[in-house]
Image (tube, rainbow, N blue to C red):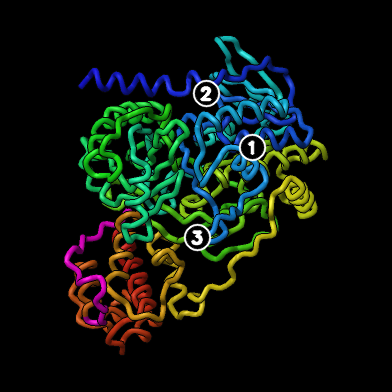
Amino acid sequence: MRRLNLKVLFLCLILFSLITVPIYAEPSSDYDVIVIGSDPEGISAAVSSARNNSRVLLIDTRNYVGGLYTSGMLSMLDMNYITSGGFQTVNEGFFKEFYDSTAVSANIDIPKAKNYFNQLLQNENVTTILGASGITPIKQDNQVVGLSYQKNGVPFTVQGNVFIDASIDAKFARQAGASYKVGREELGMQDEYAAATLVFSVQGVDWQKVKSYLNSDNSIYTGANDKVAWGYANMLDYAPTSDQFQLRRLNMSLQDDGSVVINAFQIFNTNSLDEANIRENYLRAIEELPYIVSFLNTHAVGFEKAFLYQCADELYIREGVRIVGEYTLTGEDVFTNVDFKNKIAYGSYPMDLQATRRDELGGTILSSRNIYSIPITIMVPQVIDNLLVVGRSASYDPLSHSSARTVPVGIALGQAAGVLASYSVDNGLSVRESSLNDLHVLNIQTNLMRAGVVLTTPLNTYHPEESSWSYPYIVSLRKKAMLSMEFNGKNDYRCKESATYQTLHNILSLVHANSALNLPTIDNLENDMNLVTQSQMLVILNRLMNSGYISVDELYENKIIDYSTFVRTKDKFVLLNEDIYALMSCVIDYITASQSIS
């Protein structure tokens, strides 16, 4: 076993080392724009700024560029399409340029992407320093004015006018003093983060067999084409060697060399602020890979002869730091499709809250595809000047982050940050001044559209749930990530439909997955398709509260439900979905108060 683990580790450590030679450059001492981090959003920012005639430095601790798309092996793209079932992306501009050059059917070939990034940075005259260590901001009062680093043991200092942090978990911005939130803290889940993932690849897969199986299993949540595939719900049956691990449905992409890259291996208790913890979890995950591949051999059609090929050089960290910006994009902004006047990008990916612990679900979906706009001010940290933050560490709340964390959105933000930085330098303005002034924002938007970014996509204005009497309760639940509007691939709360036990199952699953509430497990509910009566609902609520109320009247008299909910539900035999939403919202608020959970 030890020999096998060492072999796997060796394969992982040499991954990509022979594909291309990293870019190195002798540093100057003065730049218009300095980008920290060579993830795709950092490359987008650097290239965008260079194309706007700025002198740009890109610096990273890694020895090769591409970040999550190369060292993280994230080759199956989480696309932001305009409609479900359609293939027109909301992220054009630099992302479309990258996609058209490297991708086929939402899949990138990793070596091809790496070479593309290298060549692009050379062609755009972006000074690139890789393998740096100790990258640290230099400040004057609240302004970032430079950075220091070491290269091959030699210290260097460079100055810049604008700094764009595309590093993992905004490490540079945090060092500069930017305020930030972590993980799920706004949901009352302290020290909890979405599962990290070790992406790996296998050889020996019968891709045609995979396609045939996933396209004929009668599930709307699985499918495959010539390059990507998704499915196998039975992966959750995998029994890991540790409760820290979980295998969920497979996201797969076919590489040009015939290998299949898999994104499905969830690793819990990965603290994005603890580098030692991340490294330890990475090494432990490598040791788990042979067992996972063995499970695939017997439980995934088409994988009968698969064998381990490669694994990523680093963990895919989905959730960690989010800076506190001039504006924070919220889940409600996404649910209600706010069309920001100062938008610089769109997103549409489902709100996908990945699991923070073993849950036999793999995560929870709060919405299906749903186009929303993203304002320029989420990149601008409060207080600290001359600094922008792009990628998943921009200013989001946990709900909006669950959609906007995707790399295509990060690339769109990177392009906007590059334009904003260059515009500010050219006009002698701070990036904060530029981002908060309507005229300057309009000029920046014009420059983005000249570069191919589309900012005229119409947003949904039809929200039928707003006409329901229970809309305030719907908002209350969904702000807590306890209510999903996704139903069979569509966004529909079905307010006026008779409630079934499926509605209750879904809410209770979300409460258990996305909160710190200590609720009893109710595992013997009626069949999902059975209708919920008022008396049956009262039984469920009593079990949740460990109480013995005999009527809705008593719930109201004891201030567990409010007057509006009481009046709307007291005379009903079979409840509607909107009634369930109101009753559950009131009872959850009551339980939250009794457990003193904020």
Measured as percent of width and height from the top left, residue 192 is found at: 36, 44
Measured as percent of width and height from the top left, residue 113 is found at: 55, 32
The boundaries of the magenta stretch are: 516-535
Report the front residue among 257 and 413. 257
Q: Quadrant of the N terminus?
A: top left
* Secondary-structure class at tag 1: helix
Measured as percent of width and height from the top left, residue 327 is found at: 61, 52
> Which amino acid type is marked by label 3?
Gly
Q: Which residue is mark 2?
A: 62
- Is residue 132 visible to the viewer in this orientation of the structure? no
Q: Earlier in the sequence, mark 3 or mark 1?
A: 1
Q: Earlier in the sequence, mark 3 or mark 2?
A: 2
Answer with left or right where residue 298 lies relative to residue 162: left
Residue 85's disc is 3
Q: Are marks 2 and 1 in contact (CB under 8 Å)?
A: no
Residue visible at 58% across and 15% down in the picture: 150
Magenta region, main secondary structure: loop
Q: Quadrant of the C terminus?
A: bottom left
Q: Which residue is mark 1?
A: 44
> Which amino acid type is marked by label 1?
Ser
User: Residue lying farthest right?
Assistant: 427
Answer with left or right where residue 578 lies relative to residue 558: right
Confirm whether the magenta stretch covers residue 230.
no
Measured as percent of width and height from the top left, residue 434 is found at: 75, 46
> Which amino acid type is marked by label 2?
Arg
Residue visible at 35% across and 48% down in the picture: 355
> Distance between the Cα atoms at labels 3 and 1?
28 Å
Answer with left or right where residue 326 lies relative to residue 222: right
Numbered marks: total? 3
User: Residue lying farthest top?
Assistant: 153
Residue visible at 77% across and 48% down in the picture: 450
The residue carrying pointer 3 sits among few (fewer than 14), some (14 to 19) or many (20 or more) residues within 10 Å by Cα, namely: few
